[in-house]
Image (cartoon, coloured by chain):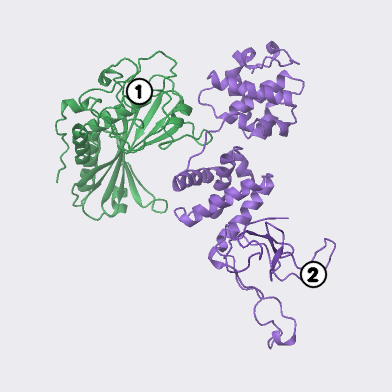
Amino acid sequence: LFFFLSLDVLPRVTCPNHPDSILVEDYRAGDMICSECGLVVGDRVIDVGSEWRTFSNDKATKDPSRVGDTQNPLLSDGDLSTMIGKGTGAASFDEFGNSKYQNRRTMSSSDRAMMNAFKEITNMADRINLPRNIVDRTNNLFKQVYEQKSLKGRSNDAIASACLYIACRQEGVPRTFKEICAVSRISKKEIGRCFKLILKALETSVDLITTGDFMSRFCSNLGLPKQVQMAATHIARKAVELDLVPGRSPISVAAAAIYMASQASAEKRTQKEIGDIAGVADVTIRQSYRLIYPRAPDLFPADFKFDTPVDKLPQL
Amino acid sequence: MDQNNSLPPYAPGLASPQGAMTPGIPIFSPMMPYGTGLTPQPVQSTNSLSLLEEQQRQQQQQQAAQQATAQQATQGTSGQTPQLFHSQTLTTAPLPGTTPLYPSPMTPMTPITPATPASESSGIVPQLQNIVSTVNLGCKLDLKTIALRARNAEYNPKRFAAVIMRIREPRTTALIFSSGKMVCTGAKSEEQSRLAARKYARVVQKLGFPAKFLDFKIQNMVGSCDVKFPIRLEGLVLTHQQFSSYEPELFPGLIYRMIKPRIVLLIFVSGKVVLTG
């Protein structure tokens, strides 16, 4: 049974035996049940279950459902709109054979752009397989930005991409700007600009990215085993702690760490492959690698099984 | 018509940073991991501060104010990086974000480290790199004649609606618009900027326009300096979150927007700092 407490406007119905007890709604059967004794107190008139059972092999082009899509009241303003279906009888056609009453009136025109943006956000998130919670967070951010209107002049797609970036950051699973660029038509520069503007407009801030945030994604995209991933995480963290790579972007450091770890293991990857996955140039990996190479023995975790010993690591 | 460029003499006590703490930024960052301890001082009447603010308001971005506050900025950044890689005497310069309203004009702040008066700490003075100023020549100009007759002038109306003129002496570039307004960039000091603007005005005058020299105003000054030690930007962004923006993916430097004085600093890992505004 799915419970939710109804705001009881008292005079309506109460259990005759327990006038004070809260009535629980059973939404499927449309009953109100007393929580003390289980007596079914009231029948609701409205059944909120679906009215037709639809089967996936049902080829019927006409959808017999009369209630429309699920509401999204959290996001769209009010969700009430009127749609006019295709006419069936003779009266709905005018002189030329065109149907009177154009097919569908505009729905919720006030936030058509916002709904469009939500669709775009969902599309972008699908391309990189982002879970629903990130998409919801992105939608919320977008709504806040949109209502504030301080970034009204900017392209909605740019704002949506930047919101997606912020949502990923806020959920603790940051995506690089380049990854967001890959699924959006907006340039990295514009996304970066919108990102800064949104942070200022919403007066929030985000945590700094660390090398560890990207390890699992990059390593699994490269097909590296868990040992190598853990080694790379350790290397990168140690390198940052010892400040061997001052001023380098965490992505570059992560890529160099992955390179070092993979070269020391049985699963070697070239700089080019890693660069493709991480979105960094292979010269960048080379630069960062040169910085961590001298301290390589200190960076590996203690229990790492070397396939290629430390002194035989490639030196670029 | 001439602007008064001369600085009113700075009260000597104010020039020393101990009085001129960057006037309290009201937002107090709760995290102070570096423990440049603030023994909370009784809030003194900020008379020295308000004087300082007044002077700052009276002159628009005069150099000494710039330097004193920029000194603040550099000392501020130097003060908040205890994880130094050179041993450095920690200055007692108050950090912009962590000195709320407790300036004490009389006594210097007493941090945990032994007190060295802030004024003798670093002696780093930012060097001015660029000054942008505007002046109104007071008459409509015909850009085509200027471009044809003047030396070192370029005019491409399809690309940009102004004449771009350059002079060698204070090496500067000026954008001259048909309304008579002119923007002069590239000078290394306020005096040079004014001099260069006057030279451009004379060039225009010699071409036959009744040029005047109205409303010379310096719009922006850019300076740079080096604090001589590496800076941990991650730490800085943790403590001064409201003012800092550090996105290594977008730009390798940290962008620190100081509220009072309104300056933007680009702080780099190497210790170089660019101040603008």
Crowd tier of the residue under label 1, counting other residues whose Cα lies within 10 Å: few below 14, some 14–19, many 20 or above: some
Name the one closer to the observer, A75 or A91.
Answer: A75
What chain does badge 2 belong to?
A: A
Give the amino acid at mark 1.
Gly
Q: Which residue is mark 2?
A: A61
In the image, which is nearer the foreground, mark 1 or mark 2?
Answer: 1
Q: Position of residue B164 (x, y in %)?
A: 34, 45
Residue B166 in view, yes or no: no
Both labels 1 and 2 in a single chain: no
- Residue beneath disc 1: B37
Chain corresponding to green in the figure: B
Of B43 and A288, the residue lying toward us: B43
Quick one: which residue is furthest to the right in this view?
A57
Residue B135 image point, x, y percent = 24, 46
Q: Quadrant of the C terminus of chain A?
A: top right
SS type, badge 1: loop
Give the amino acid type for the residue marked by disc 2 in the picture.
Answer: Thr
Q: Residue at x 50, y 26 (%)?
A: A247
